[in-house]
Amino acid sequence: MTNGGVYMVFARGSGEHLNDLRAHEFYKDVRSVLNRPPRLVNTNWVEVGNEDGDVPVDMNIEPWNYGGAPPQPNDSGEYPAVGWADWGVLTGMDGYYNSVWKGVDELTAHLNDRANRCPKESIVVGGYSQGAEVVGYAMMSISDYTRSHIGYVALYGDPRATACSSGEGVSVPWRRGSASCALGSLKTRNPYTPSALNNRTGSWCDKWDGVCTGKAGYIPPSPASSHGSAYQDLWIADSANEIANRSLDKLNQLNPNSTPFSLPSYTITPPDTSPGSPAAPPPPPTITHVKRTLAPDGTTHEVYASTKSSVTEAWWHPGGDGVHTDEIIHISQDNIVGFDKVNEPDGTTQSLYTAVPDGVWETWWRPGDGVHHNKIVTGLSGVRQVIADPQQESAGYTHRLYVLAQDGPYEVWWRDGGDGVHVSHLDSINGPVTMTKSKGPDGTEQLYVATPTWVYELWWHPGENSVHTGTIINITQGDIRSLSKGENLPDGGQLLYTGTSTTAWQSYWLNSAPSHGTIATGQANAMQIKKTTYNGVHELYLATSDHVQEYWWNGSSSGGGELIRISQNNITSFDKSNDGAAQQVYTASGDLVYETWWAAGISPSSSVLFKVDR
């Protein structure tokens, strides 16, 4: 067959052979509908890993009748669909992702070639599990011309599923199956599908399948998981009429001078939205922390936002194609308490440190090397916060973290290729609430730790084994919430800012005990402060639950104003940055991050930058 007809391509799941259960069911069910009398449609079939057809596969043989020698790809360059044992779960899933990207490259090249050689064919692409991830990324990689020949994309049990509506009227046109909220176990893919294929894509996710819902209790080998049965037993058959309808519609479009094929009717099975469903939409997530950074290239803007369950990265190029989002890490226990992010000195690697109650996860990535996760700190109790403060030392580049636990701060350090991760308890401070790290005018390392009533200074000289402790301020009100260390002054003086629910305090010292004053008073539910300096002007930013306020001073001049107000009264965090002449504040409100920017002579303007999925 040269032109016309429907060309069917399928990508199998992890550890599956050619013509395995899902591929066989897909082949049988979709062809049955395509050729339901009086229709007779030319169809061709191929599987990723055997596009060259050099492995004979008789699709009339039931998968369970192969015995001990089922058909497998015979070329090392073909998609292997590696099984769990070869995923490399202890090495960043490198085996799995090598398999996925081999499949993506193979499928992309094959589809581009096929569309060019057979311009009147409607192409149907299906994928299950690992194969669904292969297909999803291949749809991003094929040419626009090839995309215009796609009749339908059918995904089953996709570990990158991105289909969840929290009841806000958000349309997810590809959502199929019984799961009303599917946020894949291997993070979501954004965009999930090219916009041109939004209405020609279906992603079937069963409510008991943790691979696509992201629910840890329903991921194989859990006996409660339906991942290994639901699709060949139910959802592939459920999808066949829709696949046939859309693929024949595309075939008619590509062959306008031929007699059009009749289109089979179909209905979409609604998801199970009952509160008892294991994949019911969760409550909208609440962002707890936000941080603005630049990527190692110095031009890509990044904002990171954490909820209890994930850390999401938003990135964009000024003047580029908009804001892109990626989920960097998902913690199924829903117990993230904070994070920090740094760029490493090699100029390409980025590292994220995510704090959970008993320790810290390290996530690192660089172009072409995927995302790697490892829990590097364990065994602590009541962790509240993590600060990343790597140092270039005489012994080499040293990764260094400060972790605030219920019994006080810990220092964590290691060197690449060294003797492991070292953890030391800096001091016993019971019930701390927050901390901030800085350096003194003479290079002294400083860590400020706050309890509800006291702010302590821990300081030490580089290379010194002893840690000294003193007090900075006592606030009997007993509701200290945040700290921010100001820049060291030219005369060697130091400034520390302490925020309570009503007041922002300034502490100053130079060769004597600290003196204290207030910058802001009479606040209601103030939660965070941050001190910066911009063009020699001192700036203090203060967030309450409904607005972010700026206070500034320079010598005898001072002023300030409200930067953003959120009527929902749900601000939880903010960060401040400068880009040349422009200044920005990034404010977390519910599941949204707002960007507020202003410059000399330009009033602050705010808009939603991005929304997190979970």
Image: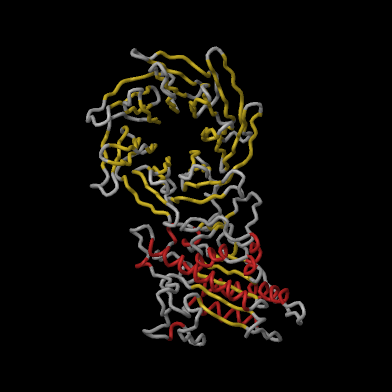
Q: Can the viewer see residue 30? A: yes
Q: Residue at x 50, y 38 (%)?
A: 292
Classify residue 253 as left or right of residue 178: right
Q: How many labels does the image show?
A: 0
In the rendering, at what x and y percent does residue 137 appear? 53, 63
In the rendering, at what x and y percent does residue 531 appear? 48, 26
Q: Toward the viewer: 417 or 498?
A: 417
In the rendering, at what x and y percent does residue 68 appear? 36, 84
Q: Quadrant of residue 17?
A: bottom left
In the rendering, at what x and y percent does residue 503 appear? 50, 20
Q: In which quarter of the image is residue 485?
A: top left
Classify residue 21 as left or right of residue 460: right
Q: In which quarter of the image is residue 36?
A: bottom right
Q: Residue at x 38, y 52 (%)?
A: 373
- With respect to residue 553, does 437 lie above or below? below
Q: Residue at x 51, y 56 (%)?
A: 188
Q: Can the viewer see residue 290? A: no
Q: Toward the viewer: 126 or 476?
A: 126
- With respect to residue 322, does 234 lie above or below? below
What colour scheme was applied to this rendering of the protein? secondary structure
Q: In which quarter of the image is the N terminus?
A: bottom right
